């Protein structure tokens, strides 16, 4: 099993920044992808950003240019730097891991709340 622990959420005004971090422990894989998802009240969980085992990054359109995902393989961590935050970014943010080349993310953290006030 892989355990994931997120940190860094909080309350911020629109236009502000937050940095989320996630540490993975337990079972490790030679190649694995890491990602961030979010779920707002009354909405389905959605993909936010991902970084694959080789360092390639990808984002949903609404956050591209404002959010940056990065990973530290030596520490088994992934971070999400969020700038120019908007009220619509308010959600519970989850860290997730999947083994390459699996399609679905199999391991999830408990989530960290991000609230952006207008």
Image (cartoon, grey):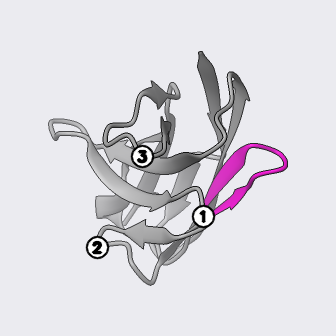
Residue at 53% from the left image edge and 70% from the top image edge? 56
Give the crowd class for mark 1: few <14, some 14-19, many >=20 residues within 10 Å: few
- The percent coordinates of residue 22 (x first, y second) are 65, 42
Quadrant position of residue 93: top left
Name above or below for residue 58 compared with residue 4. Answer: below
Residue at 58 percent across and 56 percent down: it is 53
Give residue 54's mark: 1
Q: CA distance from mark 3 to mark 2?
A: 26 Å
Residue that mark 3 sits on: 101
Q: Nearer the viewer, mark 3 or mark 2?
A: 3
Q: Position of residue 113 (x, y in %)?
A: 48, 39
**Nearer to me, 87 or 19:** 19
15 sits left or right of 9 in the view? left
Residue at the limit of the structure toward the right, as seen here: 74
Residue with the mark numbered 2: 62
**78 falls in the magenta region:** yes
Quarter of the image that includes the N terminus: top right
Q: Is residue 5 above or below residue 16?
A: above
Mark positioned earlier in the residue sequence (1 or 3): 1
Sequence-wise, the earlier of marks 1 and 2 is 1
Q: Nearer the viewer, mark 1 or mark 2?
A: 1
Instruction: Give the class, few, some or many, for how many residues have Cα within 10 Å of label 2's Cα (few <14, many ≥20).
Output: few
């Amino acid at each position: 099993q892989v355990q994931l622990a997120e940190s860094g959420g909080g309350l911020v005004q629109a236009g502000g920044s937050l940095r989320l971090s996630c540490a993975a422990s337990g079972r490790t894989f030679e190649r694995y992808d890491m990602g961030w998802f979010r779920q707002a009240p009354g909405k389905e969980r959605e993909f936010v950003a991902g970084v694959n085992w080789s360092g390639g990054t990808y984002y949903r359109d609404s956050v591209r240019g404002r959010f940056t995902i990065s990973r530290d393989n030596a520490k088994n961590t992934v971070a999400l730097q969020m700038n120019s935050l908007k009220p619509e970014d308010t959600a519970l943010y989850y860290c997730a891991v999947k083994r390459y080349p699996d399609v679905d993310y199999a391991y999830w953290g408990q989530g960290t709340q991000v609230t952006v006030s207008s």
